[in-house]
Amino acid sequence: MHQILRLIAAGIALVSSGVRADSVPSADPAAIRRAAAAALSTHVRPSGETHLLQAADAAPTMWTELEGLRIGACAPLAVSKDDAESSVGARFAVAIDVSRHRSTHAKLRRWSAWRDGAPPELPATLDVVLRNGAWEADATPLRSLKTIRTRPDPASIPRSDAPPLAEGALPSAAAAGIGETESPGSAPQVSGKPIVALIVIGVLAAAALVIGRMLANRGVIRSPHPVAAAGGSITAVRLRPHLLDRDERNLLKALESTVRPGRLVSAKVRLADLFETPGDAMASRLASTHADFVLTDADTSRILAIIQRVDRNDLSPAAASRHEFIRSLCLSHQIPHYEFPANSDHREAVERSLKV
């Protein structure tokens, strides 16, 4: 029954995206999933019928246990110009499915309650590319996990045998550059400088900070009355001068000029307005996270796609977690999901990729 539903969803995605079935690259789904399992097996340890993993920044005693880990659906992705120059003949997204997970407590060293779905440190998809006749996985998103020192066993991870979905049905894990890390530079050292020079530098830095704040606050309308926060403290509320920055406005213009008639593009939409859940913890996260842009039907308000702008220079854990959370939601609900890099030619990228 599950496979039938997947095939129906694939057919719907095929029709809605306008991709012809004969345009999907001919490939070996088993080989694609084997490549994904081989990459993932270096970061998970089989434990009976479950698997164990550790986040890259976790303490040695903190483990996450996965139940129902499985290499799931796969779908072809568009081959970019950079891919072609790197001898990549095809690119597929492969889903990593998890039924539920739990983690050990850092101090009490006991297991938490089971939670549905995958942990945030595990990517929802892996990209697998065909290079020089061989399928290999892009392990960049797996940098958020520690490498297991025991000998990896790809066969310990169950794999689906379903045919590939339509092109773009699964989000790319590598296109946005999420998971890439940079080695921190060495901190500058001060040696042999006179104390007077240090004082002058400190005064100049303080003056620059004050001037910067004055310039940043230009045009900002301040509320004349302080507003009491929920905790009882008093805070000043400011009105932002613009809803979108310049690059976000450029992406919005590119979307509005490209989408079909009868489509509506909305900016900065809370996930709580798109998804609903009975759990308090998940409801709080949905309320505190927003999608950059949402494409809906102008007449029925039916949600057609979620669109994210990804800043490749922002490699913070918070940004990576936000994008991965949105990817997982779109994947689990079969919602088309697009990511466009910040500060790029949005019009060309949107016209080439948007198929909704």
Image (spheres, helix red, strand yellow):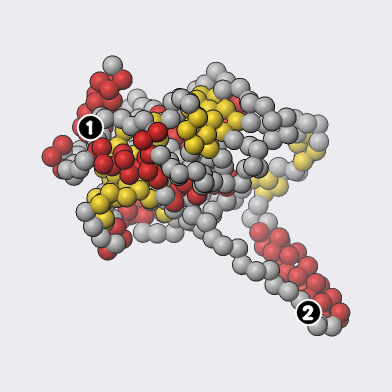
Give percent across and percent down for residue 245. 51, 53
Q: Nearer the viewer, residue 87 or 208?
A: 87
Give the mark nearest the N terminus, 1 or 2.
1
Q: Nearer the viewer, residue 29 or 6?
A: 29
Q: Amino acid at mark 2?
A: Ser
* Secondary element at image label 2: loop
Q: Is residue 327 left or right of residue 214?
A: left
Residue beneath label 2, please?
Answer: 191
Q: Amino acid at mark 1?
A: Pro
* Secondary element at image label 1: loop
Give percent across and percent down for residue 153. 40, 39
Question: Which residue of the protein is positioned furthest toward the right in this rendering?
Answer: 195
Residue ID at (40%, 33%): 156
Residue ID at (67%, 62%): 215
Does the rendering let one see residue 143? yes
Residue beneath label 1, please?
Answer: 163
**Residue density around tag 2, few if under 14, some if 14–19, many if 20 or more, within 10 Å:** few
Question: Which residue of the protein is positioned furthest toward the front in this rendering?
Answer: 151
* Circle count: 2
Residue ID at (25%, 29%): 162
Label 1, label 2: how many angstroms apart (C-alpha)? 64 Å
Q: Is residue 324 left or right of residue 258?
A: right
Residue 47 against residue 185 in the figure, above or below: above
Give percent across and percent down for residue 74. 30, 37
Residue ID at (73%, 74%): 189
